[in-house]
Amino acid sequence: MLWITIPFGTIALLLVPLAIGTDAVLLREIGPGMYWVIVMLFGVLVSVGRSSMETLPQQDASALLGLDPAAGFVGRTVSSAILLMIFESVVGVVAVGLYDISIIGPLWLLATMLIVAIGLALLGTLTGAIVNSSSAGTALVPLLVAPLSVPLLLGATQTYDGLLGGYGIVSWVLLMVAVVLVVAIIGVVSSRPLQET
Amino acid sequence: MTVQTRSRRWPWVVMGLSLAVAFTLSMVSPADSVQGDLVRIMYVHVPAAWLAYTAFFVTFVGSLAYLLTKNLRWDRVAAASAEIGVYFTGLALALGMIWAKPTWGVWWTWDARLTLTFIMFFVYLGYLALRRTTDDPIARASRAAVLGVLGAIQIPIVHFSVVWWRTLHQPPSLIRPDGPAIQDPLMLTALIVGVVAFTIVYAALMVKRIELIHLEERRLAVERSIERPVAGEAVTVPQLGGAL
């Protein structure tokens, strides 16, 4: 999946300046926001890939082996988060190069990338489990994940703005962490009832 | 038979009466010194927005209650409330845009509350779309309940957006620590009556929609219980004859 989404995300980053103009100052200003929008939209494709969805034979095998559905959920989330972290890193390097984005507070940025990766992975895995084996299948997942990932998008963009402007970012990081924790709890608690249906 | 007829009609009667009172008050209240008659849109916009929050909160409660009790009654409450919530969110957004054009000069502005409310609208459209993906009532209820709980993350973010960001959208007019922002008693009454009337409309619509969902489930159950011919049943084994 990464071999498709990384080039796709890169093309999107190339298309934006063609559509809105190649003013370097403007691109530097909107670059971080564009990066996070692309991470959210294309990250959904990564998070609904095979690693996060459990097919019916896999579900049967897990049930026969006595695997706790919560453990399966956590495993799928971790694998998805790793893929998303790779996606974010590669597209991030491209965005920095193309838009001349300033890297301020690298540790905070890394932490933000990690939280977003985990949050998107959780949302993708959970919504993947919700629609799993339904007739609409994966087509519905982006519709569900994209609006639900808004707190992560706001947190990520505001954190960068805060670092750039020199004002407090802790509240935005806490918002993202709170959302991640809530989705993680819902995912773990609901994994068994979802598997039973 | 008579009781049945009454139970079907009373929500409409209550709804009609409460809306009539709210409409009358919104028309007799004075025009705003700045906005003029445009302020009358607020007597529908504010109650509709209030109802959207209430409806989605009830969806959250119904979803949580279903996950805890596995009682399909709670799923019907959550589903009915989400449908009504989506309708009133759409109404609040549309009226907000109609009000914004003469007031702010644009149909849409990238205001935090507007944008987040629009996004919340899509969360619950997704909820309704998910409910249409399966006919199995148990699977539908379980999956929708998880999303109903998950979707509630948006509600506090939309509500506090006007506090977190400096936006065009004014902060709450009624529920404020220092009392309501509206000074004119008739305008305040019209707004409060509007909120109460819309809440009654919500309750009436909930009663009717839950009844309808229950009937739909019974129809599906009856349809499933009817034995139908199996595909291929009409095909018979070819009979060999003649040469053998």
Image: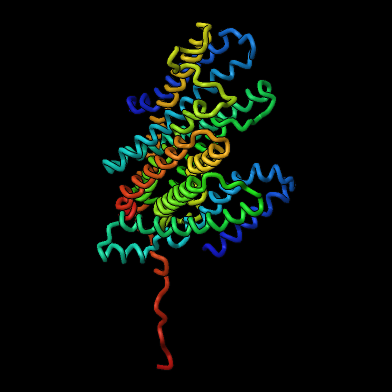
Furthest toward the bottom, the residue is B243
Q: Nearer the viewer, residue A176 or B202?
A: A176
Q: Nearer the viewer, residue B77 or A69?
A: A69
Identify whether B178 is placed above or below A59. Answer: above
Asked if residue B173 lies left or right of residue B101, the reply is: left
The residue at the point 45 percent across, 12 percent down is B179
Residue B68 in which image quadrant: top left
Identify whether A121 is placed above or below B41. Answer: below
Tally the numbered discs. Answer: 0
Identify whether A112 is placed above or below B104. Answer: below
- Quadrant location of the C terminus of chain A in the rendered image: bottom left
Query: Where's residue A43, x and y in %?
Result: 52, 53
Asked if residue B89 lies left or right of residue B150, the reply is: right
Asked if residue A28 lies left or right of residue B64, the reply is: right
Q: Nearer the viewer, residue A75 or A35?
A: A35
- Visible residue check, residue B133: no
- Visible residue check, residue B140: yes
The residue at the point 49 percent across, 20 percent down is B172
Q: How is the image coloured?
A: rainbow
The residue at the point 44 percent across, 38 percent down is A175
The residue at the point 39 percent across, 22 percent down is B10
Query: Where's residue B240, x and y in %?
Result: 41, 86
Query: Where's residue B76, x and y in %?
Result: 36, 38
Query: Where's residue B157, x and y in %?
Result: 46, 33
